Image (tube, helix red, strand yellow):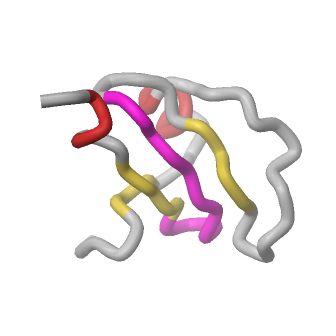
Amino acid sequence: MSNNAHQRDLIDDRTGDTFHQPAPFGLVTPVACADGTAPSSQRGRTWQDLTASGRVLRPAGGAR
């Protein structure tokens, strides 16, 4: 099984911003703001950093 099997798209329930996580336990990278604009930073962050800063992440298109 390759790391590609894990790739997942995420959405922040609070803001609507979208993210991508290419590897299990890997960094989460911002993709777009809710209004479709590019994020101010495309630096990857850990899941823990994002949730500690108030992000409420869930799989895009998935159940809450």
In the rendered image, the vertical position of residue 2 relative to residue 11, given as above or below: above
Would you say residue 35 sits in the magenta stretch?
no
Vertical arrangement, residue 9 with respect to residue 22, above or below: below
In-image side of 3 versus 18 (left or right): left
Residue 26 found in image quarter: top left
Q: Residue furthest front?
A: 1
Q: How many marks?
A: 0
Residue interval drawn in magenta: 13-23
In the displayed structure image, the side of residue 19 where residue 63 appears, left or right? left
Which residue corresponds to the image point at 74% horizontal and 63% vertical from the top-left?
A: 33
Q: Quadrant of the N terminus?
A: top left
Q: Is residue 20 within the magenta segment? A: yes
Quarter the C terminus occupies:
bottom left
Nearest to the observer: residue 24 or residue 13: 24
In-front residue for pair 64/3 = 3
Compared with 45, 17 (above or below) is below
Residue shown at 79%/76% (left/top)? Answer: 35
Q: Position of residue 38 (x, y in %)?
A: 84, 56
Q: Is residue 2 left or right of residue 54?
A: left
5 left or right, relative to 58? left
Provide the major secondary structure of the magenta segment. loop
x%, y% of residue 11?
A: 49, 62
Query: Residue, x 81% and y 50% (percent of image)?
Result: 39
Tell me where residue 16 sits by quadrant. bottom right
